Image (cartoon, grey):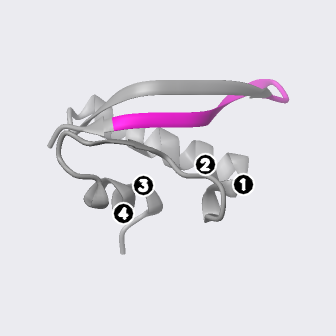
Amino acid sequence: MLSIAESLLVHTPLGGTSELPRAGTALENPFVYDAAAREIKEHARRGRVEIVDEVHVPVGAEQIVSRLAFRRLR
């Protein structure tokens, strides 16, 4: 079974830019969104995607990802 992030990657065309959705999805929870964003960032470290925009917000003593846009490379 694919994770939310993997499913989004599969449906993003090569070379296409996409934003990790929030409203109306399971990603409305900020911690779930952050986890999915971190998973996409791991794909970026492997060269599958390029992060084109990333925003963090403080939550307690930590910073979580609140917005992430990426371009699929392969």
At numbered mark 3, what does the secondary structure look like: helix, strand or loop?
A: helix
Q: State the CA–CA distance, disc 1 to disc 2.
A: 6 Å
How many residues crowd mark 4 within 10 Å: few (<14), some (14–19), many (20+)?
A: few
- In the image, taking residue 33 as reference, residue 2 lies left or right, namely left
First reached walking from the N terminus: tag 1 or tag 4? 4
Residue type pointed to by label 4: Ser
Question: Bounds of the magenta span?
Answer: 59-70
Which residue is identified by label 3? 5
Residue type pointed to by label 3: Ala
Q: State the CA–CA distance, disc 4 to disc 2.
A: 14 Å
First reached walking from the N terminus: tag 3 or tag 2? 3
Q: Do the residues labelled 1 and 2 touch (CB within 8 Å)?
A: yes
At numbered mark 2, what does the secondary structure look like: helix, strand or loop?
A: helix
Which residue is identified by label 4? 7
Image mark for residue 33: 2
Q: Are marks 1 and 3 in contact (CB under 8 Å)?
A: no
Residue 63 sits inside the magenta stretch: yes
- In the image, taking residue 53 as reference, residue 71 lies left or right, namely left
Which residue is identified by label 1? 29
Residue type pointed to by label 1: Asn
Q: State the CA–CA distance, disc 3 to disc 4.
A: 5 Å
Q: Where is residue 28 in the image (x, y as percent from the top left)?
A: 69, 56
How many residues crowd mark 3 within 10 Å: few (<14), some (14–19), many (20+)?
A: some
